[in-house]
Image: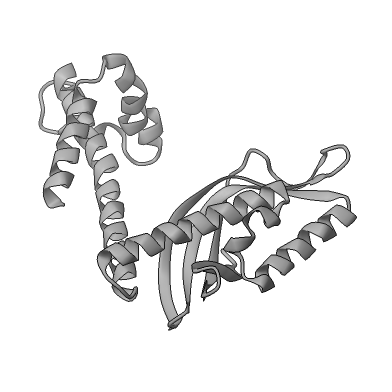
Amino acid sequence: MKKNYQVICLLIMAFLFFMPVQAFAVAGGHGGGSTGGGSGGGSNSYYRDDRSTTSMSESENFLYIGLSLGSIIVFPLVKKKRVQYVEFNDLLSRMPGTKREKKKLLSEINRVFYAIQKAWEEEAPEKVKNCYTPRLFEEHQQVLQKNKDEGVRNHTTKITIQELGNYRQINENSFSIRIDFSCFDYLVDRKNQQLISGDKRERLYFSQVWYFNYSEKDKRWQADFIQPIFLD
């Protein structure tokens, strides 16, 4: 894993160094030009007080900028990947079964989540009824029917899971897991499609705890309850 990070760092810095001069115009300007100077950066990023020349050579400037930007881009990326790796291993450690069984369960969680979200967007939960326990299926039907009666429609589109975490085994046939995801979520008038709330162009982020029960009848895991986590 460490070797991969080093390779990524080298590739990005090499890419930045060999970029055309025109591409550096904006990055260099923001890094040490008027914008950077206004925020406390300025020429000290590029000059030394004891130099007899007024500026570095072009190649030195580009190299410095390339290395600086490479560090800015790579190190947060490496840190994020490392955190995600640790969190994923922590998630697996909480789950029962072999590594293969754990990955199979995670795949099933993804499948059920996306199936229910798609059914919600289509207002057709009956299409994926086997993904629900009877309780949650009835709840979603009631909410969708209420929307129809009030002449509104809730759209949730372009859904992407960001992260899974906080797995908790409740009993042999029940568990909960946190699902962080993003999507476009908005409410429109059913007749004229006029926007009532939300934003069609702004991606929103959500965190929910999903509870799953195993159905002996259907021989599959089913979503039983969804608890929202309110983000600041």
Residue 163 drawn at (x, y percent): 42, 58
Q: Nearer the viewer, residue 150 or 20?
A: 150
Is residue 209 something that shows in the picture? no
Look at 16% across and 27% down and name the residue there: 63
Query: Observer-nearest residue: 134 or 9?
Result: 134
Residue occupying the point 29% across, 47% down: 77
Q: Is residue 187 above or below residue 220?
A: above
Which one is in front, 165 or 111? 111
Q: Seen in the image, is 87 located left or right of residue 170?
A: left
Q: Is residue 156 above or below residue 18?
A: below
Query: Which color scheme is applied?
Result: one colour
- State which quadrant residue 50 falls in: top left
Q: Position of residue 114 (x, y in %)?
A: 54, 52
Identify the residue at horizontal 13%, vertical 43% (top origin).
6
Residue 215 rendering spot, x and y as whole percentages: 53, 73
Q: Is residue 123 left or right of residue 47?
A: right
Q: Is residue 81 left or right of residue 38?
A: left
- Report the residue at 18% width, 17% height from top: 58
Compare residues 218 and 188 and report the one nearer the observer: 218
Query: Would residue 211 be visible to someone looking at this image?
Result: yes
User: x and y percent of residue 7 in the render?
Assistant: 14, 39
Position of the C terminus, as image quadrant, is bottom right
